[in-house]
Image (tube, coloured by chain):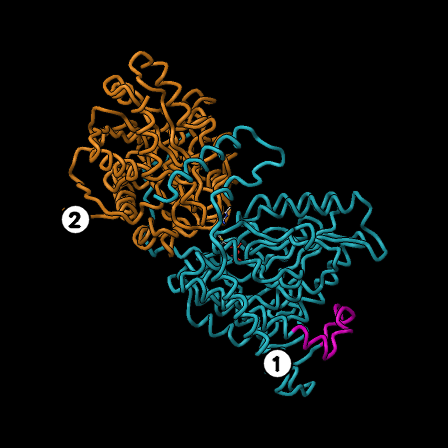
Amino acid sequence: MAQTTLAKALNNGLRAAMERDPKVIVMGEDVGKLGGVYRVTDGLQKDFGEQRVLDTPLAESGIIGTAIGLAIRGFRPVCEIQFDGFVFPGFDQIVSQLAKLHYRSQGKVAVPVVVRIPFGGGIGAVEHHSESPESYFAHAAGLKVVACSNPADAYWMIQQAIASDDPVIFFEPKRRYWEKGEVDPDAEPQPLFASRVVRPGSTLTVATYGPMLKTCLAAASAAETEGHDIEVIDLRTLSPLDLDPVVESVRRTGRLVVVSEAPSESSITSEIAARVQQEAFYSLEAPVLRVTGFDTPYPPSKCEEDYLPDLDRVLDAVDRSLAW
Amino acid sequence: MSVPQDWIPPKAGVQESRPSREHVVAGLKATDEGDPELVQLLTPEGERVSDPRFDSYATDLDVDALRSLYRDLVLVRRFDREGNALQRQGQLGIWVPLLGQEAAQIGAGRAMAPQDMAFPSYREHGVAWTRGIDPTELLGIFRGTDHGSWDPKASRFHLYTIVIGNQVLNATGYAMGQKFEGKVGEGPDSEATICFFGDGATSQGDVHEGFVWAAVYDAPVVFYCQNNQWAISEPTERQSRVPLYKRATGYGFPGIRVDGNDVLACLAVTRWALEECRSGNGPVLIEAFTYRMDAHTTSDDPSRYRLADELELWKLKDPIERVRVNLVREHHVGQEFFDEVQAESDELAARFREFCENMPQPAPDRMFSQVYAEPSPVLEAQRAAYLEYHASFEGV
Ligand SMILES: Cc1ncc(C[n+]2csc(CCOP(=O)(O)OP(=O)(O)O)c2C)c(N)n1
């Protein structure tokens, strides 16, 4: 089967969703002629026209806010936020309106808006281009938050997010955009809001998502050479968290390391650590350990190697857990 | 609420909801023939012309002043080109070129008094130059060693702002502070603020809110919009239905459009606007009508969205060439002067390059530095743990 990059898989997924449903529209800055700064929307305006692929004015509150209005009218907008750090001008619309309309109207108004956000570091960019803001969104009740990690998931998850009647904040691991993988358009996709065991193992569980999956798989392979059999779980969905597979895994392995690029304080990784110790307390042989970015603003890019969890930091946590 | 069930999406290419690029180029051509609203003191052919509204702000601009402005323009362009080249050679992660916008920036920057404050966006290398910031100070941002190394308080040039339009409210608040402290009015220590942003930025809510605040508090702030025609791939008409300077009227302050490739006009109009602010008549919106001659950044590919014609057209309005022609034709400045400036610019570029190539890699400690003004025990612990972990690799 042909190998597809993650960016192209998203492009194909968007195209499939747009072909299937004429109410699906794509909107954002530079998504038209330019095809987005990462070319995820490449060619869509050419094929679907200017009213289905909207080059919007440069205003994120405007993008999200009008998408909400379009959704109320029956459209299914897919908004592109150019970079993680630029979502905040639109944050008010996301948390005040997008997250709450269904609840406020007691189901009379659905807002099936997808907000696509390229996230995470590792591309040597200037500030505001490398952030991991997912925990802010997971904290807002009413939003669903997912993160893809590979081309096949990207292809399916974007279509499932668009088909969902709930607002979905859709995180794309930008440093993995150019990585290739197989995408089978005839396969039966995994449900959207479910985590998945990507690598089975028995000694220790690593739970992660998005850009860190690749790092964790590499760490698991490295640990194998030292005789450790590590299970790796791709969370895929951050809100609602599909924690059962993680808890089930920890019951078998007795150890959990949670890995994320985001700062650790009050984050998705803290949530996982809290809940796993609650649900699998008697199975744990060691405390749940976390490997994360630091509680600093994202640093200048020459410091990213220090900031971002890498293979060594994951292995270090694995060793500390095993040594408990 | 009913949803029209028979809604059929329009086919690609059927709806041209906006003017074509050809049309836009034709519109830009029209400004060559003289937009009556466009303030100009030096034509693209290098001819000094009069504008009765602003002549009084340019009376001191004699041959020496012109030479000095020429020098600014050439030096700034030179290190900008060097920045671009350094990115291509892998020395910088990215560069944001200012090519084409030198006059808009030097004119505005040289209009400022030392006590005035500037809030830049991220392309204002020319304004930084006029604030006495050494160009090497700009390198850390683009090489990834810092987020801006100069002291914004000492230089009265705030840090670069990447989030579009974010700085406009901050500039307005700063200007409100100048007013609250009684620094507005007649007198030598009166102050004003100038805030730089692009045409795309005018769509942001923050910019709109900044205009509202500035108006209702009579804040002494000059909003300086460099309309370089493009917000990455989106032309100005994707942001507004009216010329941007005309928007000011709706907020209750004057808006004016100046030829952004004419350094004299930019200087005179900004002097006027800053004086309006210093004396308490602000705010003012200036739209410097110019053109981004290069890519948006070194990561951008403008051939995907704009026409070569357009570029050719704007080349004829080059901001440096017209000053050079004027110096030669009207002031008989000889070749030695131009050679001197050329030599100086080469030296600057070489120094800029050498500095860049020798910038040290930040130590891991840098990451934790100055997150808070007061110590944070949690972060201190993180720092100590990481440094210990890091040290464990030494000698491995
Ligand atoms: C809030 C926000 N959204 C998106 C971006 C990405 N972005 C960077 S520059 C740019 C275009 C800016 O155009 P304009 O305001 O006209 O300024 P110019 O770069 O042309 O000087 C965009 C969309 C950003 N930096 N900040």
Residue that label 1 marks: B340
Marking on residue A5: none
Residue visible at 41% across and 31% down? Answer: A111
In the rendered image, the vertical position of residue A80 relative to residue B301, given as above or below: above
The nearer-to-camera label among 1 and 2 is: 1
Q: Are marks 1 and 2 in contact (CB under 8 Å)?
A: no
* Location of the C terminus of chain A (image quadrant): top left
Q: Label 2 amino acid?
A: Ala
Q: Is residue A135 left or right of residue B52?
A: left
Find the magenta span and give its range. B50-69
Q: Chain of mark 1?
A: B
Q: CA distance from mark 1 to mark 2?
A: 60 Å
Q: Any idea which chain is the orange one in this picture?
A: A
Query: Is residue A270 or residue A81 the one in the foreground?
Result: A270
Q: Label 1 amino acid?
A: Glu
Residue that label 2 marks: A2
Relative image position of residue B104 (x, y in whole percent): 61, 65
Query: Is residue A127 or residue A69 the one in the foreground?
Result: A127
